[in-house]
Image (spheres, rainbow, N blue to C red):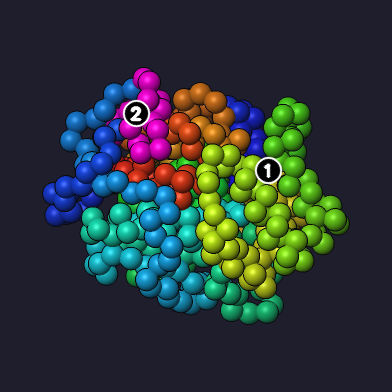
């Protein structure tokens, strides 16, 4: 999930595709600081931008599976991914968070595919069918390692440039690629704002309310938490509990959770998740091969590519307000949207609003 220090501080389509007409969502293409409901309709302040492409209704839970799942060797991994849409369409990469998997985009992907996008939804390292190629590769998960996995995936699939989208770990990963390799990013949709981890800031205490929200991070820092994560049944129960806390109004059923929970059975899941959270707060070091990238990220580099940031209002990790606390990190074309009534797993809770943001970011 997102960087607690970031929380504390603030607390068009490709050629030819823009002509496709979709219905069901009002445009919010130029809404700066505007709140939206689950369908994407603005609530309260803000203005609707002229010329945005409206989207079809895309209710959560419409789809239950991806029709195509693939594998490709990329970098240190054999990456599993879902794919939808035409093979030669403009590419959108959708990156999931923790504790989630590719099914966070099971309703988003068809909406974008119907518009002519080629949608790629990979399992991050330690999740689903993604595997390390070598037993000798350290099972680390510092932020640059996850980002380089996705760059390697783009290389393996011969994707020069894509629209990057994400939430939670996925937002952080997309932010990093946009900041360090902007030539690979056409546009960015980042849920939660600027999530590149500032490890030095993480060493300082936050307010009691913020520290309480991060209970599982402190749990993972203990031997008890480690043992829980290494037990498959216990970690699945823990992940389901997290879902209920961070998406308080999302009425998901057991089948929906079970589909995603299969990804948590990956043999490297515990090691990757534990390393990620322990690394963030300085308890352990990362793999030396990523040191030079982490040094660059420590400077909190700006994101210059066209960006829409999304804040789900019921997400406990989303700071109140209009995104001004991280606005200075985005130096290119930019819009901010808040979604009323939505929790942490935004693309699965409000797929149409998320897909609309992708379309509009591509047209900034």
Q: Mark 2 vs mark 1: which is more N-terminal? A: 2
Secondary structure of the residue carrying tag 2 is strand
Count of numbered marks: 2
162 up-or-down from 28: above or below: below
Q: Residue 194: image x %, image y %? A: 51, 39
Secondary structure of the residue carrying tag 1 is helix
Residue pointed to by mark 2: 42
Residue pointed to by mark 1: 199
Q: Describe residue 196's horizontal placement relative to residue 202 as left or right.
A: left
Place residue 248 in its image quadrant. Answer: top right
362 up-or-down from 154: above or below: above
Q: Main secondary structure of the magenta part?
A: loop
Q: Nearer the viewer, residue 200 or 242?
A: 242
348 up-or-down from 6: above or below: below
Q: Residue drawn 76% across and 32% down?
A: 205
| Comparing labels 2 and 1, the label whose residue is closer to the camera | 2
Q: Describe residue 141's horizontal placement relative to residue 18 as left or right.
A: right
Q: Residue 95: image x %, image y %? A: 47, 56
């Amino acid at each position: 999930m997102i960087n607690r220090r970031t929380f504390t501080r603030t607390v068009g389509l490709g050629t030819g595709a823009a002509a496709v007409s979709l219905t069901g969502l009002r445009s919010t293409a130029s809404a700066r600081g505007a709140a939206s409901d689950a369908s994407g309709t603005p609530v309260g302040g803000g203005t609707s931008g002229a010329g945005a492409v409206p989207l079809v209704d895309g209710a959560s839970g419409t789809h239950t599976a991806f029709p195509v799942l693939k594998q490709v060797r990329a970098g240190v991994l054999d990456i599993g991914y879902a794919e939808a849409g035409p093979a030669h369409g403009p590419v959108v990469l959708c990156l999931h968070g923790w504790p989630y998997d590719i099914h966070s985009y099971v309703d988003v992907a068809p909406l974008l595919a119907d518009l002519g996008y080629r949608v790629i939804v990979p399992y991050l390292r330690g999740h689903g069918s993604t595997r390390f190629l070598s037993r000798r590769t350290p099972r680390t998960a510092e932020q640059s390692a996850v980002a380089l996995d996705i760059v390697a995936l783009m290389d393996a699939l011969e994707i020069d440039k894509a629209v990057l989208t994400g939430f939670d770990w996925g937002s952080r990963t997309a932010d990093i690629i946009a900041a360090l390799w902007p030539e690979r990013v056409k546009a960015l949709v980042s849920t939660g704002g600027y999530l590149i981890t500032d490890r030095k800031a993480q060493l300082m205490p936050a307010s009691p309310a913020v520290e309480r929200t991060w209970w599982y991070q402190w749990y993972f820092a203990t031997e008890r938490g480690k043992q829980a994560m290494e037990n498959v049944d216990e970690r699945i129960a823990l992940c389901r509990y997290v879902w209920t806390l961070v998406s308080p109004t999302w009425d998901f059923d057991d089948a929906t959770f079970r589909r995603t929970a299969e990804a948590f059975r990956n043999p490297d899941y515990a090691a990757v998740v534990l390393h990620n959270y322990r690394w963030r707060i300085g308890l352990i070091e990362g793999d030396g091969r990523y040191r030079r990238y982490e040094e660059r990220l420590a400077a909190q580099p700006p994101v210059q590519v066209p960006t829409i940031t999304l804040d789900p209002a019921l997400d406990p990790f989303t700071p109140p307000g209009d995104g001004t606390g991280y606005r200075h990190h985005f130096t290119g074309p930019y819009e901010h949207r808040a979604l009323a009534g939505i929790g942490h797993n935004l693309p699965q809770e409000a797929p149409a609003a998320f897909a609309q943001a992708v379309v509009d970011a591509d047209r900034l």
